[in-house]
């Protein structure tokens, strides 16, 4: 649900809860798309480089930065837009039964 479809937002974090055997092995690639930007999080399934944090029953990770930047001197920008589409590629070979009842995104209104 998009609460304010006419306002531009800066997307910060995604959080979700569910029942999994091992969520870090289940999530393979997470892709973010706005009208003008694209970003991706790739995982290597190690504890050190895994972007998914667990706090009690909630899992969370930061929204990836845009894939390409304007020039080589700039840092990749945050994902901004009136909406964001998230695609999750899930490895179902190891687990066939999991429940993912909710996924939410935190954002702030963009001043741009």
Image: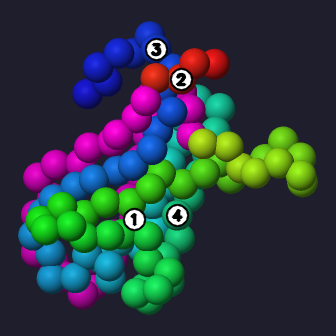
Residue pushed farthest right?
A: 72
Separation (CA) of disc 3 from disc 1: 29 Å
Query: Comparing marks 3 and 1, which lies closer to the viewer?
Result: 3
Q: Identify the residue shown where x is 29% and y is 20%.
A: 3
Q: Are marks 4 and 3 in contact (CB under 8 Å)?
A: no
Span shown in magenta:
79-108
Q: Is residue 84 above or below residue 51?
A: above
Crowd rating for badge 3 (residues with CA inside 10 Å; few <14, some 14–19, many 20+): few
Is 35 situated left or right of 105 in this image? right
Callout 3: helix, strand or loop?
loop
Residue ID for mark 4: 41
Question: On the rendered image, what quadrant is the N terminus found in?
Answer: top left
Question: On the rendered image, what quadrant is the C terminus found in?
Answer: top right
Separation (CA) of disc 3 from disc 2: 8 Å
Residue 82 in sight: no
Residue ID for mark 1: 89
Is 43 situated left or right of 20 in this image? right
Residue ID for mark 2: 110
Residue ID for mark 3: 7
Separation (CA) of disc 4 from disc 3: 25 Å
Expressed as whole percent of the image width and height from the top left, the position of residue 17 reads 16, 59
Pick whichever of labels 3 and 2 is earlier in the sequence. 3
Pick whichever of labels 3 and 1 is earlier in the sequence. 3
Residue 38 in sight: yes
Is 35 situated left or right of 20 in this image? right
Q: Are marks 3 and 2 in contact (CB under 8 Å)?
A: yes
Q: Are marks 4 and 2 in contact (CB under 8 Å)?
A: no
Q: Are marks 4 and 1 in contact (CB under 8 Å)?
A: no
């Amino acid at each position: 649900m998009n609460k304010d479809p006419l306002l531009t937002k800066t997307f910060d974090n995604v959080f979700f809860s569910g029942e999994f055997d091992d969520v870090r092995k289940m999530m393979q690639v997470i892709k973010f798309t706005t009208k003008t930007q694209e970003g991706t999080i790739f995982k290597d399934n190690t504890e050190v480089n895994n972007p998914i944090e667990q706090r009690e029953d909630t899992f969370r990770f930061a929204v990836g930065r845009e894939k390409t930047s304007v020039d080589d001197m700039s840092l990749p920008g945050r994902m901004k837009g009136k909406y964001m589409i998230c695609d999750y590629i899930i490895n179902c070979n190891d687990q066939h039964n999991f429940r993912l009842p909710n996924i939410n995104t935190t954002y702030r209104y963009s001043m741009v």
